[in-house]
Amino acid sequence: QSSLPKRQCVFQVSHKNSGGYLSAGNVSGSLQLCENTRCCIAIYRMINDQPQVDTLACGKVETFCPDATCKVQLRLKNRFIRCVCGTDLCNGNFTWTPDSEQHPLTDSISAADILKIVVLVMFPILVFALAAKWIYFYKKKAKAISQDREKNLQSVDPDDNILQPCSCQPKTPASYITNIELQQVVGQGHFATVFKGNYKDAAVAVKVYPAGWKDKFTTEKDIYELPLMRHAGIVHFLGAGRNPSDRSWFVVLEFAEHGSLHSFLCENPLSWMQAQDMCLSLSQGLSYLHSDLHSSGVHKPAVAHRDLSSFNVLVRTDGTCALCDFGCSTVLRSCSRPWVMKQTKNTMGYAQLGTHYYMSPEILEGSVNLNNSSFLLQADIYALSLILWEIWMRCSDLFQGGAVPQHLLPYELELEANVTLERLFLYVCEMDRRPSIPESWELLPQGSAMKQLLTECWDRDTDARLTAHCVVDRLVSLQADLSL
Ligand SMILES: Nc1ncnc2c1ncn2[C@@H]1O[C@H](COP(=O)(O)OP(=O)(O)OP(=O)(O)O)[C@@H](O)[C@H]1O
């Protein structure tokens, strides 16, 4: 690229996202000389069915732009039109007619593009319709479950045959999950209700799925039952079954006294050592989940969590963290690289599954390569970095001389609560922005290492992100450097 003259693109940005695109190359008037790309970009916002310029600039991330001219690509519920092209000033020459919107790209799109559009546009609609139906169904069931909560879970239905863990796991005795007394509700997720339960005077957590959510239940149970899944960084699985009275499905887990990391951080500021224990145990859990292990003839495949957030991390009494909620997870089979996904249909629905604050730029944008599932692990790393940021933002030792901020979700400050996917997309993908790191951290001995760790994990370039194993090493050496 260095021997070629720099690509010239028309430059015009709206106030909101000028920061991100200004850095893509030197601007002179309405002309920009691209620094690291040969692609120009044009983004139009649809207002009253008419496109209005949002951004014209050098592309920030595109490395591949085979089209010489600016061809319309529909994006995000048709509210934005975007094109990427690869000739000088090509982004200034954009023609649009309502027909091109109604029949998008019929002349030029490939089968892969059609698939992408179907996945991005049709799938969310389908999921939304199913979700609405489910909410109705679920509310009825949840009410019934709450009314029954004082009753014991009765013996499992032998016909369901789900208490047969894989041969590599210690067998879960059927008697273990009988006669669990359900107490109060401790969590209400999208799919299931989590109760605190009592089994032989010991606290357990019982996650109850309504009868219609067998798929979700099975995905989660199958992940817990993988060989060698017992690890301090993963909540301990005790058994699974079906309640014959209302046909609901349940998994029984170790009970984490402090509940989710999110609620813990809302209520508790942390010392540096507490924060460090949490970051380390969480990263170790993820590193273990991502690892492909062979031990004594037993194989644990790599697993991508795919819904990592501070809501899906639990805090134990000793202050360590454990991963939970594997209802969206995917097992990666690794006979030969690149990774092969076992559950491809799950992968297509990724964007709808994650808690959206934590969705990585490539997932938000839908630009992932579905043939190479290592992107699933890299998307987990992006989410991990946001959780590390959340933990450190509640660490009072990192705000000496000032009050520790209240707990905030990533991007909550910048985009307010209940941010839409569209605003998140603009902020994270188009503007390439991330949660802000306090300037005062630069004065701390560990500040620059923390900043480097976060920025390398939430890098726009998925291949540049650290592995979970590497995050563990960095956290350990961060602590070791401070102890010197
Ligand atoms: N083992 C446990 N011990 C204590 N609390 C738990 C446990 N498991 C889950 N919870 C609580 O229940 C909440 C919901 O659990 P979980 O995320 O597994 O449910 P879900 O329906 O799959 O949620 P999601 O909406 O994220 O898919 C957690 O955020 C946590 O507060």
Image (tube, rainbow, N blue to C red):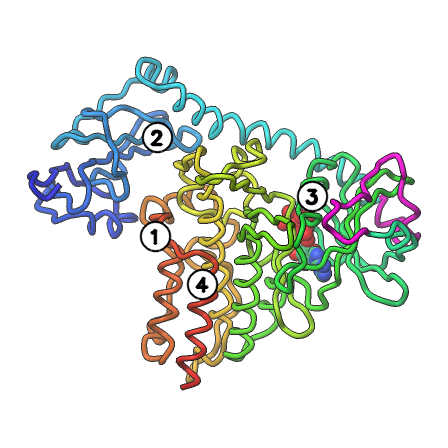
Cβ of mark 2 under 8 Å from ligand 1: the answer is no
Mark 2 or mark 3, earlier in chain: 2
Residue marked by disc 2:
46
The picture places residue 326, in percent across and down from the top left corner, at: 64, 48
* Disc sitting over residue 471 in the figure: 4
Q: In the image shown, does 60 or 373 lie closer to the viewer?
A: 373
Query: Is the residue marked by circle 3 packed among few (<14), some (14-19), or many (20+) residues within 10 Å?
Result: some
Contact between marks 4 and 2 (CB within 8 A): the answer is: no
Q: Which mark is residue 222?
A: 3
Rounded to the nearest angstrom, the CA distance separating label 3 from label 1 is 31 Å
- Residue at point 75%, 57% (across, down): 253
Quarter of the picture containing the C terminus is bottom left
Quadrant where the N terminus lies?
top left
Of tags 2 and 3, the one toward the viewer is 3
Residue that protrudes farthest toward the front in the picture: 296
- Indicate left or right for 442 with 124 as reference: left
**Which residues fall within the magenta stretch?**
144-171
Decide: few, some or many residues near mark 2? Use Cα within 10 Å; few <14, some 14-19, many ≥20: some
Instruction: Examine the rendered structure and indicate whether residue 439 appears above or below residue 370.
Output: below
- Which amino acid type is marked by label 3? Asp
Q: Residues within 10 Å of mark 4 (few under 14, many from 20)?
A: many
